[in-house]
Every structure is written in structure tokens, then in C-alpha cells.
Image (tube, helix red, strand yellow):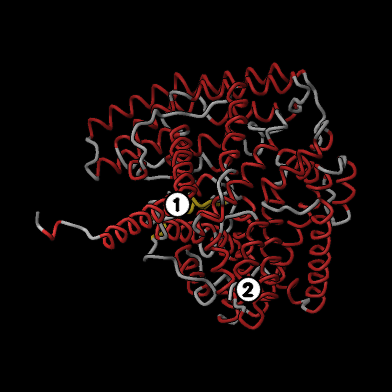
Amino acid sequence: MNKNSRLSNKQLLFGLSFLLAFLGLTLFLFTYKQDEKRFTSLTARLFTQEMAADTLNLHYTLANPADFGIHDYAPTLSCYAPESALGSRAGTENLLAALKILRVEKLSESDAWLWKLLNRSLENSLALSGFPYYDDPLSPSSGAQTQLPILLAEYAFRTKRDVEDYLALLDQVDEYFASLLIYEQERAAAGLPLPAAFLQSVREQCDTVVTKEALEAGIHFLQTTFQERLEALVQRNIITAQEAGHYIAQNERLLKTVVLPAYAALGDGLLLLEEHDAVPAGLAALPEGKAYYEQLVISQTGSYRTMDEIRALLAGKFSAEYETVKKMAAEHPEIARYYADQNSPDFPYREASQMLLDLKTRMAADFPPVPEGAVDIHVKAVSDSLADYCAPAFYLTSPLDDTDTNTIYINRKKTPDGLELYTTLAHEGYPGHLYQTVYHNRFLLSRDQSPARELLWYGGYQEGWALYVEFLSFRYAADLLREHGQETAAWAAQLESHSRSLQLCLYSVLDVLIHYDNASYSQIAKVLSGFGITDSTSVKAIYNYIIQSPCNYLKYYLGYLEILSLQERAKSLWGDEYTDYRFHTFCLDWGPADFLSLTEKLEQESSRP
């Protein structure tokens, strides 16, 4: 036997020791990574399942689902069903339980952050599920009857599969609306019906959003926008002209035989519910309305403050803004003459492209650049046929994996030119929604973070950020006006900023009064009269809108105040090392998120050596 094939006792002992050490290290590494592997697997399954279950959400979140492991899915409009609501609650409980057994300290920093956000989001969803029928999917102000057609009209066609998915979704509109009618019937039976006046408004929308006359004339926006999107595919040789003709015929058939009857059936079904003549009132008038509102505030705004704290925050800001407006008006009486002067000089820029370039230039010193290159922006006018149902402006959120080209829509019927267009573009574009979305998406992908972050929605952060930078843009506008020798116009822009803040703060206070304190119409009218709003039509419109959209004003304004509060905390913690650039980078790198989690993250980051 070759001597080199033998192991001495010393070598054998060394080999056994090495083997045991290796096994121990392997076991340690397996145990150490076990929680991370479980979390990665859990969030990956959650993401693919949620995306595959709702094709509209999938399409607006991902341009290329296959790149994220989503290959086989059936085009689906997510419909309401009583059993699905129960299943959703059970699924939330199971997911929370699975998260709770993981050791968060074993996760990477980005996974630990997602773990925290998921936990809080799921806990809030679970709490809200304890209030069945308090949600209002057919709200006259922003219900599915007006929002679904807009989402369909803006449904991007990138591939042939997108067109076929779209047509499959169109074929399910009748089932979708039928499920919402079931929800409203169950809601009325549970003693929580929509007021007859609101049901009538929804019915009127059903009668006008899709009409036989428009379809027969071929001028409905779901016809014209469909053809425009197909033409783009033909030009790019993705489909042939013959295929486009075939798809147009399918679209015509589905609009006339599925969508139009679906709206008619929904309207007829709601007519039968108008016998429940509930008086329009806030959530506080409902049996558990106050408790629901408290939970809804958390969900919509991301603020975990108590109602007393929210009241105090709003009251303090209202008082400060009121005094500022009074002082500016007194010190600059020329502002009133400026508004009265019909020959006042125009705003320096008229084109949206000029305004966006100016905003992007002025923000550069205080905001981090968007990761990985340029961003193309298209500013389009909202179709005339959509104008009555659309906001004054909106940014069409780009998918996670396709942020090169972005679109901002301006509703010319509701948004004038000049200063208002400039600040609107700041809200929707730079440094607002578009900038924040593109930054987040590219940052998330560049760091190889879990796309499950896209399942979490933080309206308070997103709208609070957009409002925060909108107010900054009034300062940018004032600087621009002064550069063009328009000193009085600059002061007017600054006064406009504080006046808008004051108005939004007032409406947020009314939201709390109506939905938490059960304030009546007459009480709200009295409050508004103190600010010179006495016209009964205006008072009624404000009152009804807040009833129909609980927390909507708070989503914007409380979100904005939370960002200001976070900023003050950053200044306190960072001292001389504070800069706006550093603060904005922190918000962008860790958001979107709820404000409790962001505050905790700020404290944690600031305590590091």
C-alpha cells in the first residue's frame, strides 16, 4: 500500500476536526439564512399571487410580468364576493402569523424594513376588515363607475398580449358591476345604505359615462383611445393592420353588448335601493363610524397620531397660516391691485415643457438626481369626453420596470395656465409624483429589493410629498417672477401658497368634524360662513364631497404636515449636518412608507456612529 494513501492519527484527527467545523459552519449558515430564505420565498409568492389575481393592478405595476416570474395568468377583474371577503381576512391572518415567527434581526436591512411595513399594513387591513360595508366603492366623487373607464382608456398596449388581455377585461365588466351591486344590496340590508341623493348621482353617471349615442357615432373615448393605441402597435410592426381591424371589431362588440348593458343594469339596480332614503351624514353617524374613521385615517394617511393630536396639529397650522395671510395682505396692499388689474403681465412661461424644465433646474440643488439616466416626459391634454370625470391633472404612474417614458395629463377644463399650471406640474411632475415614482422604482431595482414593496400603498406619503413640493414650487415661481421683474406677482404667488394651505387645512378640519364629531350640515355651514363661504350651492358641494370622500383632504394635508414634522425631527437630530438635500434623500430612499415607520427609521439612522 502506498504510504501516501495512509493518514496518520494526527492527520485523521485534524480531518475529523475540520469536517466537524465545516458541518458546524454549514449548519450555522443554514440556520442564519433560514429566516431570510423564508421571508424571500414568502414575499415572492405573495407578490406573484396578488399580481396574477388582478390584471389591472398587474398591468399598471409591471410592463414585463415574465421578468418577475409571472408567466401564466388569466385576465381577471377582481370582483366582490362575500366569501372572498372572508377568505381575504383569513389570508391576512395567516400571512401575519407567518411573518411573526420570523426573526427580523436575521434579515437584511432592506428585508427588515419590508417586514416592518408589511406587518403594519396587514395589521391595519385586518382592523379595517372588522367594519364590513363601511367602504364605498361606488362613491359619486370617485367610484368605480367613473374610475374603471379611465383605467381602461389609459391601459398601455405594449404587446399583442396586452390587447387581448384588455378585451378579456372588457368582457368582464358586467360581472364586475354585478358584484358591486350585490355589495350595495348587502350594505343596505345591513342598515348602511348610500343616501338616495348619492345613489341618484351614481345613476346619472352610469347614464352618461357610456351612451348608446356615442357608441353608435364611434366617438366614445373607449373607442377612440383604443384605436389610437392600436395604431401605435401597427406602426411598430407589433400587429398587422388586419389584426388591428379584428381587434377594433371585438372592442365595438364588447362595448355595445357587455359594457353598455352593464352600466344600465347597475343603474337600474341602484334605483331599487333609493327607497332607503338615508340622510347624507358623516361616518360618525354610523354605529361604529368613529372607530372605523380612526382606522381609516391610519390607512389613508399613514399617520398614527390620535385624533386629539391630529386636531391640535391642524389647529396650530391653521392659526399660523391665517396670521401669515393677514400679515402679507396688510404689508403688501399692491397684491390686491395686481389681481384687479386686467393688464397684469403674463406668467413667464406658457408651455408645460418650459415649466417642467424650469422646475427640474431649480430643484437640482436640494433633491438627489434620478438614478440611472434621463426621463422622457409627455404632457397630454385629457380627452374632452373624459374631462368631466377626471381630476384637474394626474400623473399616469409608470410601471416598476418601465420608467423611461412618463405621461402627465392636464385637464384643460379644470386647470388654467400660468402659476396654477406651474404648481400643478410641480405636484404631478418635478419634484412631485413623477420624480418620486421614477426615483423609487429605479432605486428599488438597482438595489435588487423585493418587488413586494409595490403591493403596499401609502397615500399619505405620496400625496403629502406631492403637496410638500407643490408648496416649494410657489417659492420657485416667486423666484422666477422676480427674475422677470414681476415683484408684485412674486408676492402674490407667495400669498397664494399660504391661502391654498389655509383652505386645505380648513377642509381637513371639516373632515374631522363631519366624520369623527358628527357635525351636521348646518354646523358646517356656520363654520364656512365665518370664512366668507355663504353660497348654499358651494356649502352643499363642500359638505357632500367630504361625506363622499372621507379622509381625502387629510390624505393630502395631514401627509404634508407629517413630512414637515419629520423634517423638524431631522433638523433636531442632525443639527449642523442637516441639509434639505439629505432630508429629501432620506425620504426618497426609505419611502413610500407610513410616518411612524419613517420616524423610527430616522431615529435609527441618526443613532448610527
Q: Nearer the viewer, residue 371 or 349?
A: 371
Foreground tag (1 vs 2)? 1
Q: Which residue is mark 1?
A: 33
Q: Residue at x 56, y 74 (%)?
A: 582
Q: Residue 464: x and y, percent?
A: 64, 58
Pick the quarter of the image with the C terminus: bottom right
Q: Secondary structure at mark 1?
A: helix
Callout 1, which amino acid?
Lys
Question: In which quarter of the view is residue 277 placed?
Answer: top right
For the residue carrying disc 2, how many other residues have a C-alpha within 10 Å: few (<14), some (14-19), or many (20+)? some
What residue occupies the far left of the structure in this picture? 2
- Relative placement, left or right, of 469 versus 46 is right
Residue at position x 54%, y 75% in the image: 366
Q: Quadrant of the N terminus?
A: bottom left
Between the residue at mark 1 and the residue at mark 2, the CA separation in whole angstroms equals 50 Å
How busy is the neighbourhood of tag 1: few (under 14 within 10 Å), some, or many (20 plus)? some
Residue 583 vertical placement versus 248 (above, below): below
* Numbered mark located on residue 475 in the image: 2
Q: Residue 323's x, y, as percent?
A: 83, 70
Q: Residue at x 48, y 66 (%)?
A: 356
Q: Amino acid at mark 2?
A: Arg
Residue 2: quadrant of the picture: bottom left
Between 14 and 25, the residue placed more toward the observer is 14
Q: Position of residue 291 (x, y in %)?
A: 79, 39
Q: Earlier in the sequence, mark 1 or mark 2?
A: 1
> Which is more toward the observer, 570 or 165?
570
Q: Is residue 115 above or below residue 172?
A: below
User: Residue 485: in sight, yes or no?
Assistant: yes
- Badge number at residue 588: none
Q: Nearer the viewer, residue 557 or 392?
A: 557
Element assignment for label 2? helix
